Image (tube, rainbow, N blue to C red):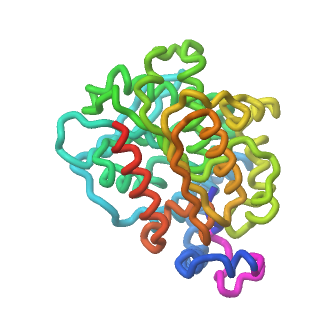
Amino acid sequence: MPINEAAASSAANTEIPAFILTAMTDQMRTVLDTQAARAEECTQAGQRAVGAEMDAETARLAAMRAEYRAERSFWNAGGPSMADTVDTVIDTAGAQVPIRIHRPTAEAVMPGIVFLHGGGFTVGDLDTHDRIMRVIAAESGAAVIGVNYSLSPESKFPQALHEVAGVIDHLVNNGNDFGVDGTRLAVAGDSAGAMLTLGSALLLRDDPESIDADPRTFSALHALLLFYGGHGLVDSASRRLYGGGWDGMSREDLDSITTEHFASPADASSPYVDHLEADLAGLPPGFIAAAGLDPLRDDSEALSVRLEEAGTPVDYHLYPGVLHSFLHFGRMLDEAGDVLTRSAAFAAARF
């Protein structure tokens, strides 16, 4: 879910509660100012994406996704160059799923980190998270494989989950086709992508046969990198305190997952969604990063406790003074670079 590019300048924006503005780092406030300065440009990009022949729902989705891509384009500029980047497609879960493989060096075969983008299951693609993927590749020395899973509301749960698990399974069994060592994989994701990261690991552990996956695939996963995901809390202190129009994380935004992504309200109780109620024993080591001013902060903290209770090694980091989606803002925000460097090193140490 994006920081709201339509927000007014952070210094004068009365919508943001004073206690949140005061708690923000100077760099985080600068990010908001930059978003505000680009607001009209991004809005126009959304408007241009709407065709006269579109019905209202198609137009809404087209505008929302184009605006998000335009907003993220600024933050994807620069960053590491790759030795090789390939876009291709994997046939899985009844879909042709686009993937992008970033290879940081010319090494013939290297471990892989499957990256699952955020965006509330409704926006986001390989381009909106490209710099994040390139930084992780450069810092880890691993190939990073981005997955352009099907978005909601056109596709409902568990379609995206099955697609990403299917891509992981394909890489385990056919990694050499891409120069990836299928026995040495990690999975990473931000926000909705973090939810898919943990959900896919649980699915591949508990019920691989349901998606025609190899039962041995789960054993190829050596680390999970979970950036500010939602893991099952429906109420918490952080959900009461944080989130609003300024960061796209209002209570209404979070509730929209139920209507946009789930086929039924009962889907929220699936162990592949409500991770805090799942059996978390035997999972790969986890790196968890939380944003201090994020309504999902307590989800990450609770997950770290539950994983430790289950005997799973966890490296938990709380970044105070920043908002949800902070990984994107590496052009201005030191915390973004820090978390990507730390998480990449965490994965590399476990291959």
* Residue found at x 47% / y 23%: 218
Residue 116 visible in the shown view: no
Where on the picture, by quarter, is residue 292? bottom right
Residue 299 vs 48, above or below: the answer is above
Who's the residue at 55% across and 57% down the image? 317
- In this rendered view, identify the residue nearer to me: 143 or 119: 143
Magenta run includes residue 13: yes
Viewport quadrant of the N terminus = bottom right
Residue 110 lies left or right of residue 9; in this view the side is left
Q: Residue at x 42, y 37 (%)?
A: 186
- Depth check: 249 or 224 in front? 224
In the picture, measured across the screen, residue 79 lies left or right of residue 292, that is left
Decide whether residue 91 is among the magenta residues: no
Classify 330 as above or below 237. below
Residue 313: where, in percent of width, then height?
A: 51, 40
Place residue 35 in its image quadrant: bottom right
Instruction: Tell me where residue 68 appears, x and y as whole percent.
Output: 57, 59
Chief secondary structure of the magenta portion? loop
- Quadrant for the C terminus, please: top left
Q: Position of residue 123 (x, y in %)?
A: 60, 49
Asked if residue 232 can be seen in this view, the reply is: yes
Q: Position of residue 8 (x, y in %)?
A: 68, 79
Image point 55% across, 36% down: which residue?
312
Position of 122 with respect to 80 (left or right) is right
Magenta region: 5-18
